[in-house]
């Protein structure tokens, strides 16, 4: 009889799936609390993506530079929760709807604004978190 071999990635896949479900539910909740009217500017998606980028900036500094964490924390929270919370697919659909609705300039502005906002959010969060950690250690 062969011995059953356990795949070491099973736990990682499980925590990513669980975290993804949590993050997607949070994003859905945000869309219910702050719905985008038909033809309106997709502020909710922009804010969700920028917030997710800021949180990933804080998270990565904390787990890589401040506190050691269990090996499943990064896949659960970073890949799962934040991956489920942020949304490239909704962003792309929002752009398509704006362009198809005759608002190509708004769609392009949204495309650029999201990219700039997301990069600024993650950069600022990393910088501020490092400053806070340095201040705390001083």
Image: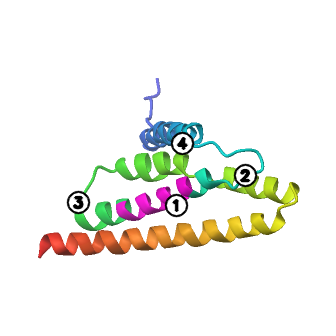
25 or 15, which lies in front? 25
Q: Which residue is mark 3?
A: 67
Query: Which of the two labelled residues, at mark 4 and mark 3, occupies the earlier sequence position?
Result: 4
95 in relation to 125, above or below:
above
Magenta part of the protein: which range?
47-58
Magenta span contains residue 51? yes
Residue 121 horizontal/vertical position (percent)? 47, 68
Query: Which of the two labelled residues, at mark 3 and mark 1, occupies the earlier sequence position?
Result: 1
Query: Which of the two labelled residues, at mark 1 and mark 4, occupies the earlier sequence position?
Result: 4
Give the class, few, some or many, for how many residues have Cα within 10 Å of label 1's Cα (few <14, many ≥20).
many
Give the class, few, some or many, for how many residues have Cα within 10 Å of label 2's Cα (few <14, many ≥20).
few
Q: Residue at x 36, y 63 (%)?
A: 58
Q: Which residue is mark 2?
A: 40
Q: Are marks 2 and 3 in contact (CB under 8 Å)?
A: no
Q: Which residue is mark 4?
A: 30
* Separation (CA) of disc 4 from disc 3: 30 Å
125 in relation to 39, above or below:
below
Q: Secondary structure at mark 1?
A: helix
* Separation (CA) of disc 4 from disc 2: 16 Å
């Amino acid at each position: 009889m062969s011995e059953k071999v356990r795949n070491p990635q099973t736990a990682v896949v499980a925590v990513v799936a669980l975290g993804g479900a949590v993050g997607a539910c949070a994003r859905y909740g945000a869309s219910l609390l702050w719905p985008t009217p038909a033809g309106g500017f997709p502020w909710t998606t922009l804010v969700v993506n920028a917030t997710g980028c800021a949180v990933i900036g804080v998270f990565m500094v904390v787990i890589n530079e401040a506190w050691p964490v269990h090996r499943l924390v990064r896949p659960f929270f970073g890949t799962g929760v934040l991956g489920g919370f942020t949304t490239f697919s909704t962003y792309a659909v929002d752009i398509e709807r704006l362009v198809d609705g005759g608002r190509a300039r708004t769609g392009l502005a949204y495309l650029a604004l999201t990219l700039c906002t997301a990069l600024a959010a993650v950069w600022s969060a990393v910088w501020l978190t490092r400053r806070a950690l340095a201040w705390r250690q001083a």
